[in-house]
Image: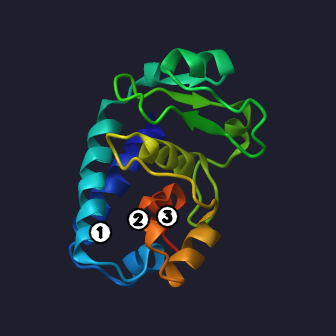
Amino acid sequence: MALRAEALNLVAARQAEIRRWSAYDEQWFGAIELSARNLITTGLARMKDVLTSLTPANFIRYSPEAMRVVGCVSREHSVGTVAEVCAPDTATHTIAIRLDFCTLRPRHPRFDSQLLTLVHEVSHFTDVFGSLDHWYSTYNAKAQAKAQNPRTTENADNIAGYIVCSE
């Protein structure tokens, strides 16, 4: 829950900063239209609402059966996957934690962490950003933004990197 509180603070900070649209914003999304910036602004407000509502009951240990209960079929052997959500699960916002999640550092300004993973997963919910995984890693996210890929505003690692990463 401490990471949830930290994520809430970071979302609030980004909500205040996005009005100015700086080089920091551009490194995650590129030069985007006002409509895309409004999409991000709306998503941040929704993320804040969902993060605020999370309790320990929203976090479960991952299993294919648990994912079926919340409405999704999971890929049981997804290499590198440390957490998972069922994006349409807007009733319970269940986040399934895999054991490898526990091996991640709690936070890091540039790389994978438990905090980045939490924000990444919450961004997938259809009532938040409805984000997708077009590509993974904050490195690739920044490269796609630099290349002006229009899908950066819907990619989970661009959104999570924008909120969590400070470098």
Q: CA distance from mark 1 to mark 3?
A: 13 Å
Callout 1: helix, strand or loop? Answer: helix
Q: Where is 137 relative to 44, above or below? A: below
Q: Amino acid at mark 2?
A: Thr
Q: Mark 1 or mark 3: which is in front?
A: 1
Q: Amino acid at mark 1?
A: Ala
Q: Quadrant of the N terminus?
A: top left
For image coordinates 34% across by 45% down, the residue present is: 128
Give residue 70's position: percent from left, percent from top.
49, 20
Label 3 environment density (alpha carbons within 10 Å; few <14, some 14–19, many ≥20): many
First in residue order: circle 2 vs circle 3: 2
In front: 13, or 48? 48
The numbered disc on residue 153 is 2
The numbered disc on residue 158 is 3
First in residue order: circle 1 vs circle 3: 1
The numbered disc on residue 167 is none
Q: Along the horizontal axis of the image, is 42 left or right of 69?
A: left
The numbered disc on residue 36 is 1
Q: Amino acid at mark 3?
A: Asn
Is the residue under label 3 in contact with that under label 2 (CB below 8 Å)? yes
Give residue 22's position: percent from left, percent from top.
33, 82
For image coordinates 64% across by 62% down, the residue present is: 137
Q: Where is 158 relative to 93, above or below? A: below
Q: Along the horizontal axis of the image, is 87 left or right of 14?
A: right
For image coordinates 69% across by 36% down, the residue present is: 102
Q: CA distance from mark 2 to mark 3?
A: 7 Å
For image coordinates 67% across by 40% down, the residue present is: 82
Callout 3: helix, strand or loop? Answer: helix
Is the residue under label 1 in contact with that under label 2 (CB below 8 Å)? yes
Give residue 85's position: percent from left, percent from top.
52, 34
